[in-house]
Image (cartoon, grey):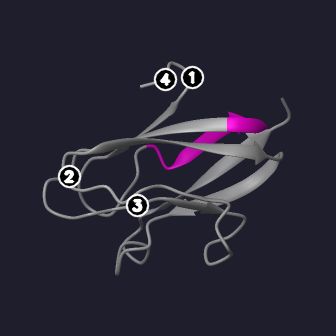
Amino acid sequence: MPSDAITIAIPGGPRFTPDQLTAQAGTVVFFLDMQEADVVHNMLIASEVGDPPLAKSAVLEPGQSVIFTVHGLEPGSYEFWCTFEGHLAGGMKGTLTVTPS
């Protein structure tokens, strides 16, 4: 895992931990750590849920981890969520605040 990565755990149930993130504008590296044992997840980032994503992680199978990088994030507020059926409705979403670098 890169030392500058933002770590997000997926510990079980439809949720990200933490679900409130802050990063500096520019390139942001995320490390998704899938701890849940029986379902798959992913993570999309956009201005709002449902907008075309600025970035999308690979699908994580149980026990997997993935690193993904988002380039060119501008200051502002973004949302992230999982697209698998029922996960967003179950609370698998969060907010990313990007501050000026």
Instruction: Give how far apart the Cα atoms at labels 1 and 2 are.
Output: 24 Å
Residue 87 position (above or below residue 25) = below
Real-space Cα distance between discs 4 and 2? 22 Å
Instruction: Return the x and y of residue 70 as percentages of the image width and height.
Output: 65, 46
Residue 9 on image: x %, y %: 35, 42
Label 4, on which residue? 2
How far is disc 3 from disc 1 in space, using C-alphas? 21 Å
Q: Residue at x 76, y 46 (%)?
A: 73
Circle 1: element type: loop
Q: Nearer the viewer, residue 32 or 17?
A: 32
Q: Are marks 4 and 1 in contact (CB under 8 Å)?
A: yes
Q: Nearer the viewer, mark 4 or mark 2?
A: 4
Q: Is residue 3 above or below residue 101?
A: above
Q: Indicate left or right for 53 with 33 as reference.
A: right
| Residue 74 circle label | none
For the residue labelled by badge 2, is the local secondary structure a helix, a strand or a loop?
loop
Q: In x, y percent, where is residue 53?
A: 64, 67
In whole angstroms, how far apart are the C-alphas of marks 4 and 1?
A: 5 Å
Which residue corresponds to mark 2? 36
Three-letter amino acid code of the residue under disc 3? Asn
State the extent of the magenta-drawn residues as a range: 18-27
